[in-house]
Image (cartoon, rainbow, N blue to C red):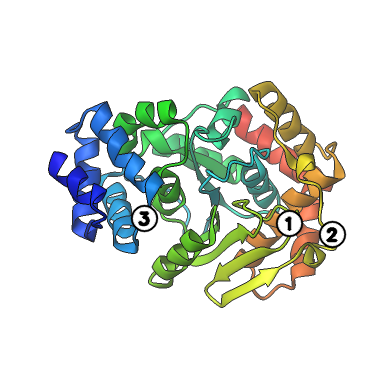
Amino acid sequence: MKTILNRLFNNYNLSKNEAKNILIDFAKGKYNASQMAAFLTVFQMRPIALPELQGFREGMLELCVNIQLDVDRSIDLCGTGGDGKNTFNISTLASFVLAGAGYKVTKHGNYGVSSSVGSSNILEYLGYQFSNNEKKLNRELENAGICFLHAPIFHPAMKNIAPVRKEMAVKTFFNLLGPMVNPIQPSHQLIGVFNLEIARMYHYIYQGSDKKYMILHSLDGYDEVSLTGDCRLYSNDGETTISPSLFREKPIDPALIHGGTTKAKAAEIFLSVLKNESSPAQKSVVLANASLAIQNMEPQASFQECLTIARDAIEKGRAYSVFSKLMNNQ
């Protein structure tokens, strides 16, 4: 590691194979906490290069726990995190809206590192039991239309690095990897990222796949459609900028989508959205992200049709019904 760190400190980039092998060595426990922290810090000081991101991703996918789920067409709604905005659990809620609308959702997620409450934190708090057992996950997909793939139990490399990331409490390149390393590699994906450079890298990488994807970055820094301003969208069809007016909304105050600092507060917001009892801003931002995900699944549908489908899933109780079914399967 000393040689690697000296190279990195002198502004050299890793090749794709070097990045992949280092990631695999992380999983093997080859490096101590100080070495791993120093390595992660390098990528806080300079942008990650495309070959490095590709190599880290390949290493994670090579090592991941493989499972077979009884679904050919499913979607993952996942953000990188690391935007420092501490919003409520928008992509997780949008996932329940998608399942409530009848789509299969294979959600990948983790505990919050740079935010107070990540998707895994909220689901665990509400009673979801993480598992990589195929029977359990397939049962959840059949009964509720959604299952949750908790990253640490699918990715051995995360086990050794997790304590270091927790102590650092800042975004690292592992934030960048999360959305790209869903162990079942679903056919469709809605991805939020925290800056435009990373959005373009994702777009380049995903163009070489057969995945139907949308990559989002709100221009004021959010890793999702925040409705606080314009958002850049990259997809199989190219790139464009979308504004709150697309969702028949005016820009909202960022304070209205803050997630609080405790699990209890996050859970309160979470359940209020599912029960159609949330604030208008909270509901609108979930609907915005869910409607884009639906259009990703149904490109022939108009956006307003997708928005109506998402709204019905909340207002007719289908999203909350999915949540109840999922929790009853624990």
Q: Nearer the viewer, mark 3 or mark 2?
A: 3
In the drawing, what numbered circle is on residue 249?
2
Question: What separation in Å lies between label 2 and label 1 (alpha carbons)?
Answer: 10 Å
Report the quarter where the N terminus lies: top left
Give the x, y percent position of residue 18.
19, 54
Gap in angstroms between the C-alphas marked 3 and 2: 35 Å
Question: Left or right: where does residue 175 sit relative to residue 239?
Answer: left
Position of the C terminus, as image quadrant, is top right
Indicate the secondary structure of the residue bearing disc 1: helix
Residue hosting label 3:
48
> Of the residues shown, which amino acid type is indicated by label 1?
Ala
Kindly state the secondary structure of the residue where label 2 is placed: loop
**Pointer 1 with pointer 3, Cβ within 8 A:** no
Q: Amino acid at mark 2?
A: Glu
User: Whole-Å distance between the Cαs marked 1 and 3?
Assistant: 30 Å
Residue, x 52% and y 61% (percent of image)?
188
Amino acid type assigned to the residue bearing label 3 in the image = Ile
- Mark 2 touches mark 1? (CB < 8 Å): yes
Is 15 positioned to the left or the right of 186 in the image? Answer: left
Name the residue nearer the viewer: 5 or 297. Answer: 5
**Crowd rating for badge 1 (residues with CA inside 10 Å; few <14, some 14–19, many 20+):** many
From the image, tell me which residue sits under label 1: 288
Q: Between disc 1 and disc 3, whose residue precedes?
A: 3
Q: Is residue 40 visible?
A: yes
Residue 160 shown left or right of residue 241 in the figure: left
Q: Earlier in the sequence, mark 3 or mark 2?
A: 3
Front position in the image: 38 or 20: 38
Image x and y of residue 270, in percent: 71, 34
